[in-house]
Image (cartoon, rainbow, N blue to C red):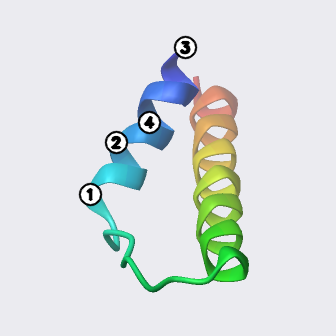
Amino acid sequence: MRIENEMLARFNTTNKMEENMTISQELDFFFDNVMDTVVDYFKEEIKA
């Protein structure tokens, strides 16, 4: 659940989606967000 909350927080605060954004751009933004969140999560888990 923590990963989902982190992704939602990033998604809502970084680079608000523009109305004229293409599907490709939306998917790129989404998957970049997912990968950044997952990487940060595992970095924290390794440190702990």
Residue at image mark 2: 9
Rendering coords of residue 18 (x, y %): 36, 78
Residue that lies at the very extreme toward the top in this rendered image: 1
Q: Are marks 2 and 1 in contact (CB under 8 Å)?
A: yes
Residue at image mark 4: 6
Q: Are marks 2 and 3 in contact (CB under 8 Å)?
A: no
Residue drawn 58% across the image and 58% down it: 33
Q: Quadrant of residue 6?
A: top left
In space, the residues marked 2 and 4 are separated at their CA atoms by 5 Å
Q: Is residue 9 left or right of residue 36?
A: left
**Which label number is shown at residue 13?**
1
Quarter of the image for the C terminus: give it.
Answer: top right
In space, the residues marked 4 and 1 are separated at their CA atoms by 11 Å
Vertical order, 32 against 3 (above or below):
below
Q: Secondary structure at mark 4?
A: helix
**Which label number is shown at residue 42?**
none
Q: Mark 3 or mark 4, which is nearer the start of the sequence?
A: 3
**Which label number is shown at residue 1?**
3
At label 3, the amino acid type is: Met
Residue that lies at the very extreme toward the left in this rendered image: 13
Rendering coords of residue 38 (x, y %): 68, 43
Vertical order, 13 against 40 (above or below):
below
Residue drawn 60% across the image and 36% down it: 41
Residue drawn 31% across the image and 69% down it: 16
